[in-house]
Amino acid sequence: MAMNPLRIAPSILAADFARLGAEVEAVTTAGADFIHIDVMDGHFTPNLTIGPAVVAAIRPATKLPFDVHLMLLPADPYIEAFAEAGANILTVHPEAGPHLHRTLQRIKATGAKAGVALNPATPASALEPVLEELDLVLVMSVNPGFGGQKFIPSQLKKIELLRELINRSGKDIMLEVDGGVDPQTAPQAIAAGADVLVAGSAVFHGGADSYAANIRALRGPA
């Protein structure tokens, strides 16, 4: 089972972008553990989102760690800029550059924690050569690009495999799941071994007054 306490990481992709700072403050107050920031370049994913300037602009809104998922091709040229903007965790894809190990070392050199994200078709075994460098593994339970997609059940088996791999390594590596996480799929992901849940629409629906109840619903029974 999960070694770390369960953490909830609201994805600001689902927030009201006209009020982004206020939205970050609201989910912080509502009990979030991380702020998850999806960075997409329109090449690696079919969507285009935000750059380091937006990350820097919302950094003063919370003391929570910024969990920044770089869906960029290539990722390397942007690592320092996002770290300087306030990212605490930087997660890249194995497909986003020719030398994954070097990319992870580059992240570590900034002082940020290093993560690797696996798309639905990327096998768990892709991580084995770089496990020693990792602080976080992110399982994409949808194809990256857009919010509001349905959870892909086959990814539960991958979460289980990765939980075994992490436990065997003895390292303190967070196991995060992102995509279609809601009060129905969250317990399945937790049972498979996830200890960080990224949720967009499941947290941000209903307006700021609902955020605390939405986060509690993802945590499940106390």
Image: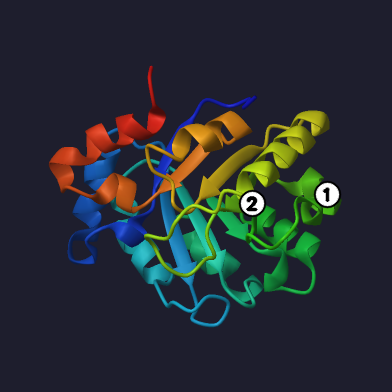
Image quadrant of residue 96?
bottom right
Tag of residue 41: none
Q: Quadrant of the N terminus?
A: top right
Q: Which residue is mark 2?
A: 115
Q: Residue at x 48, y 79 (%)?
A: 46
From this viewpoint, which residue is outermost toward the top?
Answer: 222
Q: Residue at x 53, y 75 (%)?
A: 45
Asked whether the residues under the numbered discs 1 and 2 touch, taking CB atoms below 8 Å apart as contact, a structural biologist would say no
Residue sitting nearer the eye, 191 or 62? 191
Query: Crowding near pointer 1: few (<14 within 10 Å), some, many (20+)?
Result: few
Give the residue type that dot 2 points to.
Gly
Q: Residue at x 67, y 37 (%)?
A: 173
Give the secondary structure at mark 2: strand
Residue sitting nearer the eye, 160 or 92? 160
Residue 86 in the image, given as x and y percentages of width and height: 45, 55
Q: Which residue is mark 1?
A: 128
In the rendered image, the vertical position of residue 90 relative to residue 18, given as above or below? above
Q: Is residue 219 visible?
A: yes
Image quadrant of residue 85?
bottom left
Residue 4 in the image, given as x and y percentages of width and height: 58, 27
Q: Is residue 40 left or right of residue 123?
A: left
Give the secondary structure at mark 1: helix
Q: CA distance from mark 1 to mark 2?
A: 13 Å
